[in-house]
Amino acid sequence: MDVRAVDVRKEFDRFPALHNVSLDIGSGELIALLGPSGSGKTTLLRLIAGLETPTEGTVFFGDEDASQKTVQERNVGFVFQHYALFRHMTVLDNVGFGLKVRPSSDRPAKGEIRRRALELLDFVQLGGLEKRYPTQLSGGQRQRVALARAMAIEPRVLLLDEPFGALDAQVRKELRRWLREIHDKTGYTTVFVTHDQDEALELADRVVVMSQGRIEQIGTPDEVYDRPNSPFVYGFIGESSALPVRIENGVVWCADRNIGLSAGDVPDGEATLFFRPHDVELIESSGGCIVGTVAASRRAAGTRRVELEIGGGRDRVEIEVPADHPSAEKSRVAFKPKHWKLFPAKP
């Protein structure tokens, strides 16, 4: 099922939570809505679900205008962060609930509901636990039940709001891999909200990066990580260092030093240089490179993270060096980014 949001705006008490957002989601895609708190990602998900109505704009399911249709009419499966399971119901009854409450004309027979629920519990690797209650399950097991319940209605679209946010890091990692496998087997059009960049990059076919009610960038995980299109995306996706620089005649200067980088098509004037801390080359000489004084150094697994003061301490960046690098406080380190991006300063 294709889903499209066209010029969608959403206001709460005249406060705009979404500013004329447009998004095309292809049938069978797994899409991540990624951004910090307040970026509008959950509002967009709720508009797709039918839990909110757009102030302006249209939501399409296929060629059908679904903007005024209810959640039930849209036939979406929704998985919440905190499971939203019925504590007084068994696991089996929770999974079959969406089918039991359908209108009688559309409701499967009791035996069929049970068969489908048991089949789904096997599918999500919870076979044999159908008689338990949610309080008797771990957090990861509860989230699997919530997903089975969402899939029981055979939804046209599967929506997940921070599905692993309440779980510890190890369980999150296991369930991320499992959810990708589930998606590949079922082929549901799936949209999930997260503020965890690792989750989005690992799981999604495409990532929608949001900030302040707007979409900053849409692309594959490789595209948004390797080719960020704005300072926000560069700073939000992965680790990055930023350094104020000056462009003169196509040459990049930092603290009155030509640092040996070409400005490309970036116009002369003030700019910001972005690069990844791990993506640098250490230089022996001090010409045509960035030179800084070590302010702090810490071990990070198999490498060492070094914080450098640039331009007499006016600015600071972080780079990654080999674990055995002889960096010590107040020593000087010269380096060049291997890959970088320049963004002109806003007027």
Image (cartoon, grey):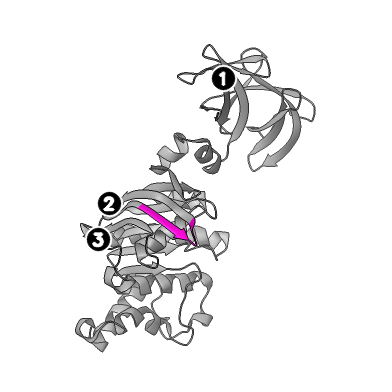
Where 187 sits versus 213, above or below?
A: below
Residue at far front of view: 14
Give the numbered dot on residue 279: none
Amino acid, disc 1: Gly
Is tag 2's residue or tag 3's residue first in the polypeptide sequence?
2
Where 251 sits versus 152, above or below?
A: above
Where 194 sits versus 225, above or below?
A: below
Residue position marked by numbered label 1 in the rendering: 269
Give the numbered dot on residue 26: 2
Q: Is residue 14 covered in magenta?
A: yes
Q: Quadrant of the N terminus?
A: bottom left
Where 293 sits versus 173, above or below?
A: above
Near mark 2 (Cα within 10 A), the count class, few <14, some 14-19 or many ≥20, is some
* Residue depicted at x 34% and y 69%: 77
Please state which of the two labelled residues, at mark 1 or mark 2, is closer to the viewer.
1
Residue position marked by numbered label 3 in the rendering: 65
Q: Position of residue 118 (x, y in %)?
A: 33, 79
Q: Position of residue 265 (x, y in %)?
A: 45, 19
Image check: 221 left or right of 253?
left
Kindly state the secondary structure of the residue where label 2 is placed. loop
**How far is disc 2 from disc 3 in space, using C-alphas?**
16 Å
Q: Magenta segment range?
A: 8-15
Near mark 1 (Cα within 10 A), the count class, few <14, some 14-19 or many ≥20, is some
Q: Is residue 102 covered in magenta?
A: no
Total labels drawn: 3
Q: Quick one: 219 or 296, which is closer to the camera?
A: 219
